[in-house]
Image: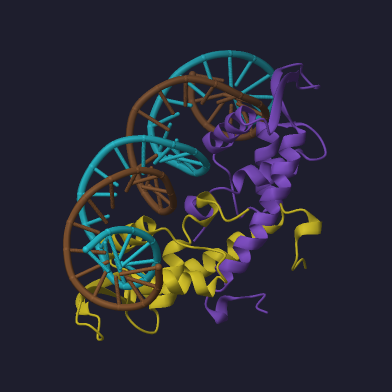
Chain colours: A purple, B yellow, C cyan, D brown
DNA sequence: TATAGTTACTACAACAGATAAGGTACGACA
DNA sequence: TGTCGTACCTTATCTGTTGTAGTAACTATA
């Protein structure tokens, strides 16, 4: 079993913003990084990724700019995080901790790996 | 800030099934228990709760039966978990642990309370 | 007596993130 | 020639959640 769209919903934005924190990036790269950082456990769908880009740009969390592949000069759309995006990311991190605390109360003991 | 509908989506079912594990229950009771167990951090909406009941009954995870309030004899709809529901719950617990592992890779260090 | 609050639901429309299906374009490799 | 990888986009659809509203009976308070 993998990760269903319902449980990951709402964290795609967080993952993308995390990866944009230190440097601008683009779709294909972000996609690869999510796959690698999650140890192949989560592969974001292309449409999910690009719809997240559009949504977050509309909300002012990221900005797009035209760039190109430095190796072959092919056009590429880059995204950079905005100040609002950084704030949003931090809020999402806090929300994650709150959500985790709540959800774990409803997870069976034998599954609560980091039970406290 | 609270917990948004996007991040809790998919866990409502899990919470309800957790509470049905040991005994049948009904809407209002489940609602109160979720509020209390989460230390008032999460209050499930009535419509969310009843639509979850309907969905899960349709999927065979729970069964409803007519009962009554033992104090005043008023009618009440009870729900009990099925075998399929128990299996589903355990799968959801496993999925939660997988999701947690993945998401935490994308949460800033200073927020990763239980970082390991 | 009136009002508010609690219990216990149901119906319906709308929202929004995720997704399936499909398209475009180019280079590399067999 | 065909497939694979890179890079991205459009459109329509799905589904859990939610807002709004309604029903109905009981209880406590003013």
Q: Is residue B39 above or below residue A33?
A: below
Please identify the quadrant where the C terminus of chain B is shown: bottom right
The one nearer the camera, B35 or B116, is B35
At a point 52% along the width and 34% down the height, the residue shown is: A47
Please give left or right for residue C24 compared with residue A75 in the image.
Answer: left
Q: Is residue B25 above or below residue A65?
A: below
Q: Is residue A70 above or below residue B91?
A: above
Residue B60's x, y, as percent?
28, 67
One can see residue A58 in this view: yes
Q: Is residue B43 above or below residue B68?
A: above
Residue B35's x, y, as percent?
49, 69
At a point 53% along the width and 49% down the height, the residue shown is: A9
Can you tell which quarter of the image residue B69 is in? bottom left
At a point 67% along the width and 75% down the height, the residue shown is: A114
The one nearer the camera, B27 or A36, is B27
Residue B85's x, y, as percent?
35, 72
Residue B108's x, y, as percent?
77, 53
One can see residue B90 in this view: no
Q: How many marks?
A: 0
Can you tell which quarter of the image residue A55 is in? top right
The one nearer the camera, A7 or A34, is A7
């Amino acid at each position: 079993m993998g990760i269903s769209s319902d449980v990951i919903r709402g964290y795609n934005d967080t993952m993308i913003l995390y990866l944009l924190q230190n440097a601008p990036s683009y779709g294909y790269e972000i996609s690869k990084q999510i796959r690698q950082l999650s140890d192949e456990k989560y592969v974001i769908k292309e449409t999910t990724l690009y719809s997240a880009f559009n949504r977050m740009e509309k909300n002012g969390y990221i900005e797009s700019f035209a760039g190109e592949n430095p190796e072959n000069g092919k056009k590429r759309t880059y995204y950079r995080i905005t100040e609002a995006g950084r704030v949003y990311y931090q809020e999402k991190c806090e929300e994650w901790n709150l959500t985790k605390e709540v959800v774990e109360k409803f997870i069976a003991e034998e599954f609560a790996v980091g039970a406290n």
